[in-house]
Amino acid sequence: MSRGTTASINLNHLRHNFSLVAQKADAASPGCGVIAIVKADAYGHGLEPVVKALPQEAAFGVATLSEARTIRRLRPQAKILLLEGFLDAAELQAARTLALDCVIHQPFQLQLLENSPQQVPLNLWLKVDTGMNRLGFPRSQWTDVLQRLKSIAPASNITVMTHFASADQADSEHSMKQLEALTDLECGLSMSAANSAAIFSFPETSFRWVRAGLALYGISPMADILGSELGLKPVMRLAANVIALKDIQAGEKVGYGGCWQAPVDSRIAVLGIGYGDGYPWHARNGTPVYINGLYYKVVGRVSMDMLAVEIGRDSAVGIGDEAVLWGEELPVEVVARHAETIPYVLPCGLTSRVQYVYTGQNDLELSAPPVHVDENIAASSTVRGRE
Ligand SMILES: Cc1ncc(COP(=O)(O)O)c(C=O)c1O
């Protein structure tokens, strides 16, 4: 028996999510394309296999030149958007060589462009700040910057983009204000605004390009909704084996700091996964784990290599049984709530100790039958086992 610490990546589910997003975007804004956001190793799912699995029409969004290089090798013709743009002259040169679309959000990037006339114009994405207050030109500079950009590249090579701060909150007044600011610009250029949350909650912001990250991986971008409720399918399934069983007496404490005490005689299953693999240390007592069709609770502090689950004295769980930490049976959104974090963090945080297995490379391969998620787990409150 091994620790069995495995992230299984279902590429059929990835493709399903991509087409769902593409359909939604096209229905809201005919001709709208999808930029698959694959930065940070495709949100921890593996950049190369994810890029290879997506359809030819997919464009890609990345944060670093190294991510862009990997994609260019795999997809010589694809549109690749460098989300923070080039940061110095050498990066500008590399972006040209790789034929990247570049976000321009700071005056120094404009100057770099103006100081190095281009033989072949790059596709430039003017980032306007409509209320996120992170990247982008302030409203007072939009007209001037647009003029300068138009003297560098033809209008057909320029897209105006912004990023929503709160699209994950339904009926967000702030998103509406951001949208109004963007449309006030009335520049007649291609536009892009929507991230995953806006694609579902604010489809009128689809414009020419949507930029979908989290939803592609089957995870809900909205705090109180699961991906499955939006028609998405989870791409990652994280599992580990039971490596030890231990009977404990009522009153005994489990793990570092003894922060969980057995209320009655019970049994603990120790799993071969811990924060050294990327499972969140913050997962509270009661975080659900799925073993052999039942939901159990994490008890005590998560260790570097292990965590403990209370299974009870009458449990049939045995050494070597597989436990699911998140996946179709147990939404990662629920685990994130128990760990007081956001679901983005969990797949992104897996370490090199986790073994990755890919299924569904072949389009003809059938996806696994749908698994019913326990409604109590979906509500994230009640989990089988004791407090
Ligand atoms: C500019 C930009 N657009 C789109 C996205 C994708 O966001 P999401 O994963 O919420 O779809 C990101 C993610 O950080 C981003 O920075």
Image (cartoon, rainbow, N blue to C red):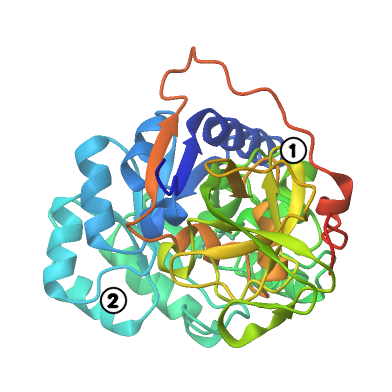
In this rendering, would 268 be left or right of 3? right
> In the image shown, does 168 or 232 lie closer to the viewer?
232
21 above or below 381? above
Q: Position of residue 269 (x, y in %)?
A: 62, 56
The tag earlier along the polypeptide, 1 or 2, is 2
Task: Name the amino acid type tagged 1.
Answer: Gly
In this rendering, would 314 be left or right of 145? right
Q: Position of residue 303 (x, y in %)?
A: 50, 73
Q: Position of residue 315 (x, y in %)?
A: 75, 46
- Residue 173, picture quadrant: bottom right
Residue corresponding to mark 1 = 293
Q: Residues within 10 Å of mark 1 (few under 14, many from 20)?
A: few
> In the image shown, does 234 or 356 lie closer to the viewer?
356
Residue corresponding to mark 2 = 110
Circle 1: element type: loop
Q: Are marks 1 and 2 in contact (CB under 8 Å)?
A: no
